[in-house]
Amino acid sequence: MDELLGRAWWMLILRGTVALLFGSLALFWPALTLLLLINLFSAYAIVGGIVAIVGAIRYRATHAGWWVPLLLGLCSIGAGLIAVLLPGIGALALVAVIGANAVITGVFDLISAARLHGRLRNAWMLVLTGVVSLLFGIFVLLFPGAGALALVWVIGVYALFTGALLFVLGITARAWHREGPSGEPHAPLHP
């Protein structure tokens, strides 16, 4: 799993970048309509899911833990498709989809972090990302009537925070992979 994370550093950076873009859009356009919020969330979930699936499939033959990012990707794409295909489901259903996606993402991030414990420097960032995702999802599921505008701000801050953590973790994983576990440089990476 640690080798998978080291080789798929680009997946973490891309996932973090998508989250940063999504969070910025949500914060800078706080008066978004619910439909635009649905579309932003759908794009975020689908792109993030595709990135996770591509990374999992790419390394499935060489890494036993490839199924974790695959499940994360499938759940993210499923949440994104539900939100885009059923835009009339209402604000509460959207809140439930967003909350469930955050809980599932948090659980899978924590599973990944547990598998990497002691093998990857700064693995705490993945733990923190998982905890923040899990807490955000629970909060959203417990308080669904918070309102769409307040939800936009919470989602924006959540996406910026987790995006920054994932981005830094990707850079750290890239450096770790280049050094190797012994601290000696590897051959150049080919994503």
Image (cartoon, rainbow, N blue to C red):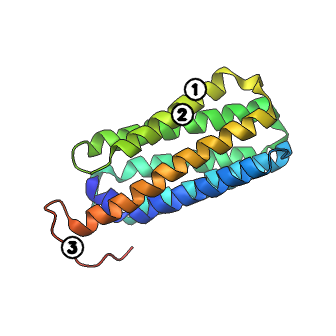
- Give left or right: position of 84 versus 169: right
Looking at the rendered structure, the kind of residue marked 2 is: Val
Residue 59 appears in view: no
> Label 1, on which residue?
138
Looking at the rendered structure, the kind of residue marked 1 is: Ile
- Give left or right: position of 36 versus 185: right
Q: Residue placed at 39% from the left, 62% from the top?
A: 171
Q: Label 1, secondary structure: give it.
A: helix
Q: Residue placed at 51% from the left, 52% from the top?
A: 164
> Label 3, on which residue?
186
Q: Label 3, secondary structure: give it.
A: loop
Q: CA distance from mark 2 to mark 1?
A: 7 Å
**Number of other residues with Cα within 10 Å of mark 3, as a class: few under 14, some 14 to 19, many 20 or more:** few
Q: Label 2, secondary structure: give it.
A: helix
Looking at the rendered structure, the kind of residue marked 3 is: His
**Number of other residues with Cα within 10 Å of mark 2, as a class: few under 14, some 14 to 19, many 20 or more:** many
- Give left or right: position of 127 versus 89: left
Residue 50 image point, x, y percent: 55, 59
Spot the residue most to the front.
28
Residue 58 image point, x, y percent: 39, 66
> Label 2, on which residue?
103
Q: Residue placed at 77% from the left, 46% from the top?
A: 37
Q: Quadrant of the C terminus?
A: bottom left
Within the image, what quadrant is residue 100 found in?
top right
